[in-house]
Image (cartoon, rainbow, N blue to C red):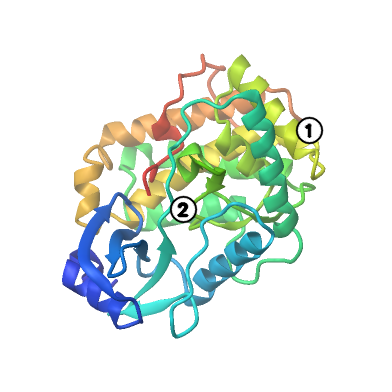
Amino acid sequence: MSNLFYTLTPDTVIKAVESNGFITSGHYMVLNSYENRVYDLRLDEGSHIIVKFYRPGRWTEAQILEEHSFLNELNDSEIPVCAPLTFPGGGTLREAGGIYFAVWPRTGGRIPEELSDDELLNLGRLIARIHNNGSAKPSEHRIRLSAESYALKPLEFLLENDFLPHHIRERYSNAVREIAGIYSSLSADVPVHRIHGDCHPGNLLKGINGFFFLDFDDFLTGPAVQDIWMLIQSRDEEGIRQRDMLISGYREFRDFEYSWLRLIEPLRALRYIHYSTWIAKRWIDPAFPQIFPHFGTDRYWEEETTDLEDQINVIYSGGEDLPERTEQSDVKEEKELTNKDFFWDLEG
């Protein structure tokens, strides 16, 4: 990875932007993002732009451009998303010092703390419209959400790079492989298409013109239910009621089979695995040991392993037609879920 990514300075950012046709006033502010480097720059004429430098090595040029293309498709369909701006010389992507970057409009709004039933219905309609566009053609370059990409390959990385303590390797590996088998079994007949992929409330803003969706950085091919459960992640009675309301709005614009809801708990487990590997792959970034000081300790991996085993118990307690079970402890009381379980780049 380019060391420039870790040491980007105001001069470097402003020079990159101005050399590609934007004239800035010199005013510059760093925005919160773990994954990428994001800056708010004021232009000479008074408006603001957001500049995002993509983490090197994560996405190829073709994958980033496909994200931009999808956003422009949605924008052309009058779906409220934040799409990249076109540089004065044409195109939406540039490179500086080996780092890809793009420029975006600055959007105003707030992350909704609570959603009314009318807002849930409206959001369901909007997600359905995103998925209608997403299913119109296949993705050529983005990854597919699968047991392989979200469980088995992450496990391989953790094992090959010795992130797992010796005493926990077998338990953790067995849990990951079991979750992979469950997801493969339950998702076999579920259709997939282009989706947001990381549709949590932190990537949703409400402004004067209503809701709009942010940050398609994790845009991928996957099942529709991924965007549904990420927006309404609670599994208590109120969470289920809100999710049903969201789906009611969704079904006004697009079919949704209620049998697909059986993927929610396996998808939740895949996110646990993906989260740990996401941190591990960025551990050389000087910011990450400071942000996640608990990561990599024996206690961390013991808790992660227990969480996965508990999640397997939750899945089997749902009564689905699942593969024959490996040795597991009895079903334990469900733990209270927190933002840590879902959002690792909430402000990004």
Return the x and y of residue 323 as percentages of the image width and height: 71, 36
- 300 on left or right of 222: left
Q: Which residue is mark 1?
A: 258
The amino acid sitting under disc 1 is Tyr
Q: Residue at x 50, y 80 (%)?
A: 91
Decide if residue 322 is in sight here: no
Residue nearest the viewer, comparing 276 with 2: 2
For mark 1, give the secondary structure: helix
Q: Which residue is mark 2?
A: 154
**Quarter occupied by residue 132:** bottom right
**Quarter occupied by residue 276:** top left
Decide if residue 310 is in sight here: yes
Q: Nearer the viewer, mark 2 or mark 1?
A: 1
Farthest front residue?
Answer: 45
Residue nearest the viewer, comparing 45 with 242: 45
Residue nearest the viewer, comparing 42 with 134: 42
